[in-house]
Amino acid sequence: MESGGTGTGSPRSYLYVPGDQAERLEKAPGRGADALILDLEDAVAPQNKAAARELVGGWIQGHPEFAASVWVRITAEDPAADLEAITAPIAGVMVPRAETALLAEVDELLAARESRLGIPAASIAVIPLIETARGLLDAVQLASAPRTVRLAIGRADLAGELGLGIDPEGPEFRSILLQLVIASSAAGISAPVAPTSTDFRDLDGLRASTEQLLRLGYRGRTAVHPAQLSVINEAFTPAADEVQRAERLVAAFEEAERSGSGVTTDENGRMVDAAVVRSARDVLARARPARTTE
C-alpha cells in the first residue's frame, strides 16, 4: 500500500499539501515525496474547509495513479464531513489529536465510506497523530488499533498542551519521542513518523535533527516544504558502506545458521547474533529504492 525505503514498506517522507490550494495540489506529485498528505486541518482556514473538501475530493478522483501514496489529514472536530473528501481509494487517513475514542469513531466512518465506494473493507489505513496528553497515554492502544500502520507525533502541539517550557527541538523531549517507538514496536507496526520542522530554510538543522530521530528509532518524517524532502529522504537512506557491512553481516550469520550455529563474528572479531543481524536487515530494507509520487 505504502511505498518507501524504511524497511517496512513505509514512506521516508510525507509532504503536507494545503487542501484548498489547487496549484500546489497539482504540483505536489512531482516534488519528490514518498507520500503526500492532503491537509484539511491546520493548513486550511475555517472558512475554506468546505471548499477544500471539494477540491481534495476532485483531486483524488482525478489522480488514481497516486492512490497508494496519498493520505488525507482530517480534523478532529468534524471527521465525518472530512471523510466525504475520500472519493476513491487512497492509502489512508491521518487523524490529528488522536485518542482511542476518536480513532474508534473514525474506524466506523471509514467502514461506511469503504462500503459506499465499493472498495475492500479496512483497505484505508490510519496514522494516529499524537498531539495530546491523553493521546500519549493511549499510545499503546492507538498503535494496536486495527487500521493503524504507524504512529506520528505533533511535537509543538503536544509540548504546548503539556505546558513544557522547552524548545520542542531540544533534548528534553526525547523520552516522549521514545514512547512512540516503544508502542510501535510492541504492536508490531512500522516505526513512527517524526514531527515536522517548521523552519524550512534551515536544512542543515533539519538534517542533524532527522539523523538524531533516526537514531531514536524513527523511520519517516513529515515536511511542510518541498525543499525539506531530499534532506529527509537522504537521512533515512543508509550510505553505501553501511549497506555493504550489513550485507556481510547477514551473509555470515546465515552461513553460521546453515552450519548449526546461532552466532558468528564480524571482520573485527566481534560477536554477531540475531539481535545484531536484525539491525543489519533493517539497514538493507531501508536501502531498497523508494518509489516516490513522481
Image (spheres, rainbow, N blue to C red):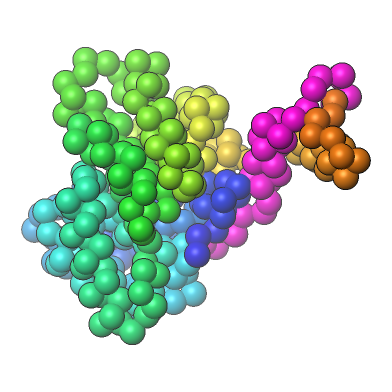
Q: Quadrant of the C terminus?
A: bottom right
- Taking depth in this image into account, of 193 and 147 the one nearest to the observer is 147
Q: How many marks?
A: 0
Residue 281 visible in the current orientation: yes
Among the 4 quarters of the image, the one containing residue 166: top left
- Look at 18% across and 59% down and name the residue there: 105
For residue 118, above or below residue 133? below
- Look at 25% across and 75% down and name the residue there: 113
- Judged left or right of residue 140, residue 286 is right
- Look at 21% across and 45% down and name the residue there: 99
Q: Position of residue 121 (x, y in %)?
A: 35, 74
- Judged left or right of residue 237, residue 32 is left
Among the 4 quarters of the image, the one containing residue 225: top left
- Taking depth in this image into account, of 226 and 121 the one nearest to the observer is 121
Residue 27 visible in the current orientation: no
- Judged left or right of residue 104, residue 201 is right
- Look at 27% across and 34% down and name the residue there: 136
The question of residue 272 being in magenta is answered with yes
- Judged left or right of residue 85, residue 28 is right
Q: Of all residues shown, which one is farthest toward the left?
A: 47
For residue 141, above or below residue 160? below
Among the 4 quarters of the image, the one containing residue 131: top left
Q: Position of residue 211 (x, y in %)?
A: 54, 28
- Taking depth in this image into account, of 199 and 281 the one nearest to the observer is 281
The question of residue 106 being in magenta is answered with no
Q: Of all residues shown, which one is farthest toward the front?
A: 260
Q: Position of residue 126 (x, y in %)?
A: 34, 57
Read off the magenta span: 266-294
Q: Position of residue 63 (x, y in %)?
A: 42, 75
